[in-house]
Amino acid sequence: MTDLLLPMLSAFIVALVMTGLVRRYALARRLVDVPNARSSHQLSTPRGGGLAIVVGFACILVVQAVGGRADTQLLIAVLPAVLGVAAVGFMDDHQHVAARVRIAVHVVAIAWALYWIGGPLAIPWPSGVLSIGWPLKLFAMLAMVWFLNLFNFMDGIDGIAASEAIFIACSGAWLATTSGQIGVASALLILAAAVLGFLAWNWPPAKIFMGDVGSGFLGAALGILGYAAAFADNLTLWSWVILVAVFVADATTTLIRRFVRRDRWYEAHRSHAYQRAARRWGHLRVTVAVVLINLLWLLPMALLALAAPSSGVFIALLAYMPLLGLAAWLGAGTAENRE
């Protein structure tokens, strides 16, 4: 993997420099998030910096492909899908795009990727391998659309979404490498390098926000690459499910509670567990806490699931239980006047 050092460094530098340029552009065009009652920040901050991640990842991946150092079929599956998601996010950052339009683009993008990757997934199960054809693939598509959107929901405090993306990408690259999926691992590491370039600007206190162009793109890219890895080697499936647990547990708990309470769950709010925690302890402490949970709890559990794939579903449940409990304790999805 040493031949990836130059592409990764290039992706990092492209994203680092371009984030600064996007910040100037956002300030000039007044693309700024102004604090309001539903915000988790206190200062007006430019948004849309995730465009730098998109450019850094896409450009370096194309250069790799032209040089014959990338998986062409994986490129066809990933790039059109994630660029489509990024495009609708870019438009939404500039002028509101109706939710039904965004979701339609997301569904088409994920369907495109799944078509080129193939499927359905075979799921390791205690009694063997579970594979039920197209219903399972439909479920996978819906799950990936949900993951794409929850990444957007969870991009609400400084550094959290970028840090999460780097953890998932690097850990996922490790999993992919163990099963010989060098193409997937390379794409994930290039993605992580591009996100790191952006994170230099987004680390608390953030100088620019990711915006929908970045959060949607990352959710799509990580979901598609994770699916590709699990499709090629189903023994890694439960490990992937575990790696994304922090965001899935918080967003899902929040959505269910808001839905049960008959809130307009699709509207902006600040009732996620991480947002409530940030109001108590600050953005930096919460972002660092998420990084530590990932490294000290979820990564070991993911490796355990990899070592015992037939017990993966039970290991995943064990990994999620304390996170679901923590989200509930912090009041995820409850009325926003509760602190």
Image (tube, grey):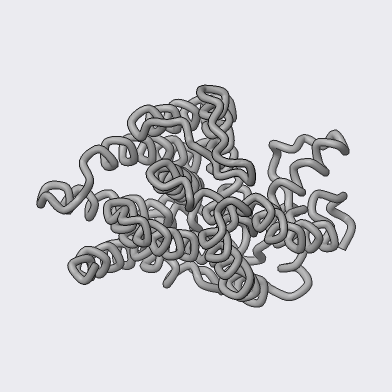
Displayed quadrant of residue 147: top right
Toward the viewer: 6 or 104?
6
Q: In the displayed structure, does residue 252 sit left or right of residue 230?
A: right
Give the quadrant of residue 258: top right
- For the point 33% across and 57% down, the residue is 185
The image shows residue 189 at horizontal and vertical percentages of: 34, 62
Q: Residue at x 34, y 40 (%)?
A: 78
Q: Is residue 118 left or right of residue 283?
A: left
Q: Can residue 31 be seen?
A: no
Residue 300 % position (x, y): 57, 70
- Can residue 334 be seen here? The reply is yes
Q: Looking at the image, is 132 positioned above or below residue 215?
A: above
Closest to the observer: 303 or 331?
303
Residue that extends furthest to the left in the rendered view of this protein: 67
User: Which residue corresponds to the image point at 33% horizontal and 31% vertical from the top-left?
Assistant: 116
Q: Position of residue 213 (x, y in %)?
A: 45, 46
- Check the picture and name the quadrant holding the N terminus: bottom left
Q: Locate the C terminus and report the quarter of the image it occupies.
A: bottom right
Taking the view exactly as shown, the residue that stands out farthest to the front is 127
Q: Position of residue 41 (x, y in %)?
A: 65, 63
